[in-house]
Image (cartoon, grey):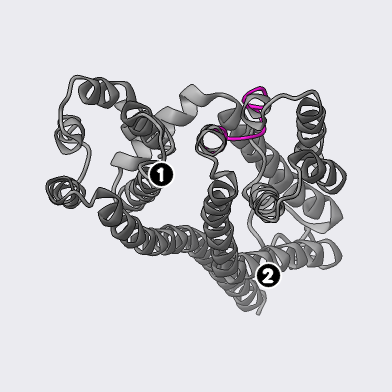
Amino acid sequence: MHASAVDLAGFCDRLAIGLDAGVDVRKVLSGEATRATGRLHAACQRLNRAAGEGESLADAMALESTVFPPLVRSMVRVGEHSGRLPEVFRRITRNYEHRVARGRTVRRQLAWPLFQLAIALAVCTLLSAIGGVRQDPRGGSLDLLGLGLSGMSGVLWFWGAIGVGACVATFAIRSLRDRPAPLRRLIRVATRAPVVGHPLRTLALERIAWTLRLLLDTPMDLRGVAKLSLKASGNPIFATHADAVSKDLGAGLPRSTARGRTGEFPGDLLDAVVVAEEGGRLVESLDRLAERYRQEAERAVATLTTAAGALIWLGIAAIILMLVFRLFGFYTGVIDDALQAL
């Protein structure tokens, strides 16, 4: 796994400020090696040693593929070749700051449903604990949840099951992260699925438009720009076409035609590229397109967050309904036993 978006945003921002002020890159990296934590800390130490030995920052970063994403490594190389490294770092910083802000928005919107879920689980725990100190009219343990759980042993079994489920989910997520092939298949299926498919596609298109806007204003070869922008999408539906689009561009096909042959790009994106190519203002057009996709991506994230919140609400509703029917059944049973005793 690469370094987190928060760490990369801070790292790139400090490098942009230092290099723009004329500070030697070795001094900046030395400060980063002291300030950074985790995997980024060790990577900065190695970058600092490489810079001290006269190696370029791009070459040193190329050896840190597990820490720095491909886009960062490629952009640093372009920045060094063009003499615009501080500007490149500023642009990368803005990209990661948007990602960090999105993550905070998602966590903020999911905080209330998760809090209510925690309250529902706490109520289930309380009812299970009450069952250990009270008895039903027949003298047996009081099973208010209807799950055969009562008393402290029931509480331990209840939270033990939740803990096992959480561990299994964590292990599954980490396994997917460490195994790209299953993760790509999952993303591909999710992108084709209803509800979540359109937001995932919009997020990928935003990354493509942003990367194109970033790279077309640099000396990078057009085929390299196309390949890197598609791979930067983070979505295999687009990334798998990187080599084909690059080959078409190498054969002299227009950008719009090369992308249109994949059948995956929306008409508005292709139309914008066509108009921009004909008018000779591709960079300006992509700038506006990237901003539009950024706004659509914000709405897409809101849609995904709403869907996740709805799933949590369904879980809460299921717990509430179970408790209502169980308690109703318990009290009607008590009344029935009392009537039969008369």
19 vs 204, left or right, is: right
Q: Which residue is mark 1?
A: 211
Which residue shows up at 29% across the image and 56% down it?
Answer: 284
Question: Residue 16, relative to residue 76: is it above or below?
Answer: below
- Quarter of the view holding residue 99: bottom right
- Magenta span of residues: 62-73
- Quarter of the view holding residue 144: bottom right
123 vs 239, left or right, is: right
Circle 2 packing at 10 Å, graded few (<14), some (14-19), many (20+), is: few
**Residue type pointed to by label 1:** Thr
Circle 1 packing at 10 Å, graded few (<14), some (14-19), many (20+), is: many
Front residue of 281 and 142: 281
The answer to whether residue 329 is visible is no
**Residue type pointed to by label 2:** Ile
Q: Which residue is mark 2?
A: 119
Q: CA distance from mark 2 to mark 1?
A: 43 Å
* Element type where label 1 sits in the image: helix
